[in-house]
């Protein structure tokens, strides 16, 4: 069984997409061993409990710069992949090196556009609308020591319309996130991913 941990900071709709993919059999050889939040009382934790998944809080207000170290203590040698699904804290240090190419994140833009420090949540979509881009989307990538700089696994695109608000664009992209994240997990779980420098080869 391919074991994953899911990191969350909010409502957990991307977490739910993974849970649903496991229940449907799309991720047939995969189990969520734990869900970790960096904030208390977020709905994603309720999703975990409802589905009999162990849930933990590593509060960033308490642990601050040690969040990554606490995650490493909890997950070291226990999971095959860490999935950042709406996770807002920056991962760093020994966690990154110990789980090299074993941590993935989903970002709501077509990296390298509208990403990096300070670009998260609705801010990403506000920037896309402001710049008048015709296409946006989401990116699943490996996590490295930078912010949204790791090798790109896959991307999904959506059109951006002239009448779009940031909220409308966010909703359209979120639908694609719910497809992209389980797809990326399946590729990794099935051993179809090879990382060659910055390039991810899908076999």
Image (cartoon, rainbow, N blue to C red):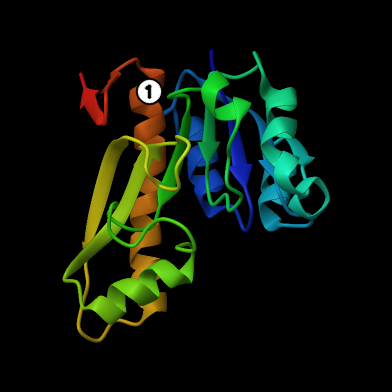
Q: Residue at x 58, y 53 (%)?
A: 88
> Is residue 55 shown to the viewer in this render?
yes
Quarter of the picture containing the C terminus is top left
Q: Residue furthest left?
A: 134
Where does the image place residue 78, in percent across and percent down from the top left?
66, 16
Q: Residue at x 53, y 41 (%)?
A: 84
Vertical relation: 154 (above or below) 99: below
Q: Tag 1: Cα neighbours inside 10 Å, few (<14), some, or many (≥20)?
A: some
Labels in figure, total: 1
Q: Where is mark 1, residue-wise?
A: 188
Drawn side of residue 17 relative to residue 10, left or right: left
Q: Residue at x 73, y 50 (%)?
A: 46
Where does the image place residue 118, in percent across and percent down from the top left?
49, 63
Drawn side of residue 48 relative to residue 27, left or right: right
Vertical relation: 23 (above or below) 123: above
In the rendered image, which quarter is residue 58 located in? Answer: top right
Where does the image place residue 53, in percent across and percent down from the top left?
70, 33
Where does the image place residue 56, in percent across and percent down from the top left?
77, 39
Drawn side of residue 41 relative to residue 133, left or right: right
In the rendered image, which quarter is residue 26 located in? Answer: top left
């Amino acid at each position: 069984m391919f074991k994953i941990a899911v990191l969350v900071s909010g409502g957990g709709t991307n977490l739910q997409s993974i849970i649903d993919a496991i229940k449907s059999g799309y991720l047939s050889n995969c189990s969520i061993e734990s869900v970790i939040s960096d904030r208390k009382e977020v709905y994603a934790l309720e999703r975990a409990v409802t589905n009999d998944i162990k849930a933990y809080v590593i509060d960033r207000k308490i642990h601050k710069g040690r969040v990554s170290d606490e995650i490493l203590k909890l997950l070291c040698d226990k999971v095959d992949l860490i999935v950042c699904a709406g996770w807002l804290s920056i991962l760093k240090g020994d966690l990154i090196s110990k789980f090299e190419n074993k941590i993935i994140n989903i970002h709501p833009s077509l990296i390298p556009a509208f990403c990096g420090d300070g670009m998260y949540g609705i801010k990403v979509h506000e920037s896309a609308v402001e710049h008048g881009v015709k296409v946006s989307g989401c990116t699943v990538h490996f996590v490295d020591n930078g912010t949204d700089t790791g090798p790109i696994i896959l991307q999904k695109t959506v059109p951006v319309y002239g009448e779009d608000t940031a909220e409308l664009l966010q909703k359209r992209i979120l639908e694609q996130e719910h497809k992209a994240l389980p797809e990326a997990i399946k590729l990794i779980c099935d051993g179809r991913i090879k990382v060659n420098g910055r390039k991810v080869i899908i076999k």
